[in-house]
Image (cartoon, rainbow, N blue to C red):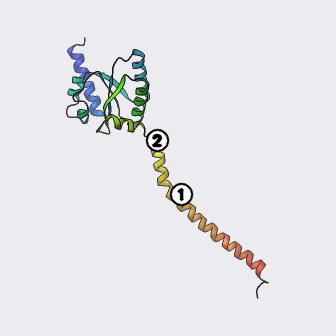
Amino acid sequence: MKNREDKKKDFEDLRKALESVRNVFVTGFEKITVDQDYNLRKTIRGAGGSYKVIKNNVAEKASVGLPSESVLQDLKGMTSLAWTSGDPVALAKALTAYAKTTPAFTFKAGLVEGRAVDVRAIGDLANLPPKEEIFAKLLYLINAPAQRLVTTLGAVGRNVAVVVDQGVQGGKFGSGQGA
């Protein structure tokens, strides 16, 4: 059993973590084995996140006055938090993939970029492409009109050169025709 100082330190650590992140997934687990828990923690670390099993009342008190307060109120059952200050999509994908293989692991709620989301929105988030792919598509869309403009301008010059070349060739071969 933890003493009062350890409990206070746990509370303060959780409060600091909740203050510093904008992406938190509230999850539930019932009867997870040690191996499953180890794999879950490994998966979360691989996605750039952190994970902690929490007491419901400690989470509720630690979140008072923070954006996560709305998702950490009135929790029931075994509860854990997975959070990241990085890409929420990567963590949502990792957690969703884990939940598919481990039915005992469930979602309760989430906080993405400071906004409360429900379980369905977490699934939608997990189906998004990675941030790098979204950036690549965005850069392509921004770059495409410039590429088309350069191609068009190059084509105009090329077409003018072809017309001039044909005129020059026509003058050489067409000088004895028509007059």
Question: Which quarter of the picture shows residue 166?
Answer: bottom right
Q: Residue at x 40, y 27 (%)?
A: 99
Q: Is residue 86 visible?
A: no
Residue 168, percent from left and from top: 72, 76
Residue 57, percent from left and from top: 21, 23
Residue nearest the observer in this picture, 25 or 153: 25
Residue nearest the observer in this picture, 167 or 43: 43
Q: Secondary structure at mark 2?
A: helix
Q: Residue at x 27, y 26 (%)?
A: 14
Q: CA distance from mark 2 to mark 1?
A: 21 Å
Residue 9, percent from left and from top: 24, 21
Amino acid type for the residue under numbered disc 2: Glu
Amino acid type for the residue under numbered disc 1: Gln
Question: Which quarter of the picture shows residue 79?
Answer: top left
33 sits left or right of 160 in the view: left
Give the residue at the far right of this rendering: 176
Indicate which disc residue 147 carries. Answer: 1
Above or below, comparing residue 148 to residue 32 in the picture: below
Residue nearest the observer in this picture, 172 or 39: 39
Q: Residue at x 39, y 23 (%)?
A: 103
Question: Which quarter of the picture shows residue 68?
Answer: top left
Task: Identify the mark nearer the N-term, 2 or 1.
Answer: 2
Looking at the image, do the residues carrying marks 2 and 1 touch, with CB atoms under 8 Å apart? no
Other-residue count near label 1 (Cα within 10 Å), few / some / many at <14 / 14–19 / ≥20: few
Quarter occupied by the C terminus:
bottom right
Q: Is residue 126 visible?
A: yes
Residue nearest the observer in this picture, 68 or 5: 68
- The residue at which mark 2 appears reads as 132
Residue 15, percent from left and from top: 25, 28
